């Protein structure tokens, strides 16, 4: 079989190479890879800025945004041949910490978890992969074109769960949400906001391209003005911050309605400095009972929530998030940012297209 592999921080870090067909161990199932999504985390792994290799190896199979079809499943696993599935990214640490022991491995406290395609374990960027049934999630059969969006949707599902849990500390009846950033996470956050019946607004810097129409077709409002003005005009009850850019992060914290919640989902690069009136920001957060929460990764519960959200969404709208489908033999191209990109996807099985 062929697989996309990464040798981080080398002269030619990406390679499509021939590897032996995987042999499922006891209790594992064999899955035929259909598609692999590529995101900023994957690019960080390629550059050596994030993640870790499997022990004793100088490379790993790339990718954590999976989609596959079950080829062979153990009896009694709940899966049968032909099922459309996605693999969960993270595995709990072997110790385990309290969170991992309770199935909340997305909140691991000692950092000894592994992540397929990212930290210490091969990813899903192969024409075949094996997985434990308890870490696979079944998708509606009609999602074969867009099911590769499951992993980023799980991240967003967790973010919304976190928002609702924090809001539940008291009476909570949000009406208006601002999503900053219209990449895959931002668009999917807007989708789940609309599914909750909220007045959704999306702020992005791109006035051209597919994003404005996608947001409008979702029934949300698209903004390109300065964030300070947008926050002042909207005073949103909830902000889902999906850019990781320093200024939107701090403007969001300072501009919500009283008892507002800011959920940070974008990872900021280090080394960039801005001037912030920390005293004023602290005063606003305290006096208005505001909350700021970071959210990353997902556990099985969030994957199942994501599967439900995708099944309830307009499939044609979801497919517009996937702006490029790259054949496996040109997989390296999917890791290069291109103008107009939202989500590039590698087609692991051309016959499935």
Image: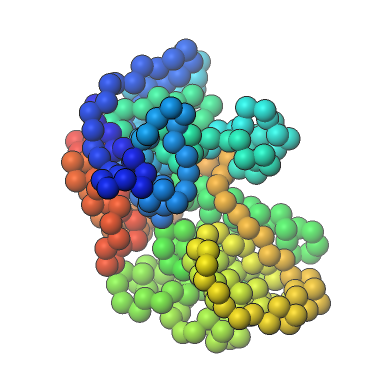
Which image quadrant: the C terminus?
Answer: top left
In depth, the one of 80 and 100 nearer the eye is: 100
In the picture shown, does residue 28 fall above or below 322?
A: above
Q: Residue at x 73, y 61 (%)?
A: 167
In the picture shown, does residue 85 fall above or below 156?
A: above
Q: Residue at x 31, y 37 (%)?
A: 5
Q: Is residue 12 visible?
A: yes
Quarter of the image for residue 273 reads bottom right
Whole-percent x, y for residue 321 in the image: 35, 58
Q: Is residue 261 left or right of residue 79?
A: right
Q: Residue at x 45, y 31 (%)?
A: 54
In the picture shown, does residue 117 fall above or below 155?
A: above
In the picture shown, does residue 28 fall above or below 292?
A: above
Whole-percent x, y for residue 299 in the image: 58, 40
In depth, the one of 228 and 175 nearer the eye is: 228
Q: Is residue 352 visible?
A: no
Whole-percent x, y for residue 271 in the image: 52, 67
Whole-percent x, y for residue 260 in the image: 70, 71
The type of colouring in the image is rainbow
Q: Residue at x 19, y 46 (%)?
A: 330
Q: Is residue 320 left or right of residue 258?
A: left
Quarter of the image for residue 168 reads bottom right
How many marks on residues? 0
Which image quadrant: the N terminus?
Answer: top left
Q: Is residue 67 left or right of residue 93?
A: left
């Amino acid at each position: 079989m062929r697989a996309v592999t990464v040798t981080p921080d080398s002269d030619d870090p990406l390679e499509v190479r021939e590897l032996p067909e995987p042999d499922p161990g006891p209790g594992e199932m064999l899955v035929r890879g259909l598609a692999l999504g590529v995101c900023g985390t994957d690019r960080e792994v390629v550059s050596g800025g994030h993640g870790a290799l499997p022990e004793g190896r100088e490379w790993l199979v790339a990718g954590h945004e999976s989609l596959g079809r079950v080829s062979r499943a153990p009896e009694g696993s709940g899966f049968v041949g032909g099922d459309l599935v996605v693999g969960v990214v993270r595995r709990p640490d072997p110790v385990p910490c309290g969170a991992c022991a309770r199935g909340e491995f997305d909140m691991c406290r000692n950092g000894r978890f592994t992540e397929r395609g990212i930290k210490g374990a091969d990813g899903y960027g192969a024409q075949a992969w094996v997985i434990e049934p308890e870490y696979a999630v079944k998708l509606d059969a009609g999602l074969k074109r867009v099911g590769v969006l499951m992993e980023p949707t799980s991240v967003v599902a967790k973010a919304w769960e976190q928002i609702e849990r924090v809001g539940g500390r008291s009476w909570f009846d949000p009406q208006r949400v601002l999503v900053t950033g219209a990449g895959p996470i931002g668009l999917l956050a807007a989708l789940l906001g609309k599914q909750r019946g909220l007045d959704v607004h999306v702020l992005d810097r791109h006035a051209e391209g597919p994003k404005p129409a996608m947001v409008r077709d979702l029934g949300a409002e698209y903004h390109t003005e300065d964030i300070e003005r947008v926050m002042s005009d909207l005073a949103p009850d909830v902000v889902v911050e999906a850019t990781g850019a320093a200024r939107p992060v701090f403007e969001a914290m300072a501009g919500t309605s009283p008892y507002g919640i800011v959920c940070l989902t974008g990872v900021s690069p280090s080394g960039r400095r801005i001037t912030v009136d920390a005293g004023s920001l602290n005063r606003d957060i305290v006096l208005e009972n505001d909350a700021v929460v970071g959210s990353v990764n997902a556990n099985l519960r969030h994957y199942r929530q994501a599967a439900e959200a995708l099944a309830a969404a307009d499939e044609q709208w979801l497919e517009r998030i996937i702006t490029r489908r790259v054949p496996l033999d040109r997989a390296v191209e999917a890791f290069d940012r291109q103008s107009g990109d939202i989500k590039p996807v590698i087609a692991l099985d051309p016959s499935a297209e």
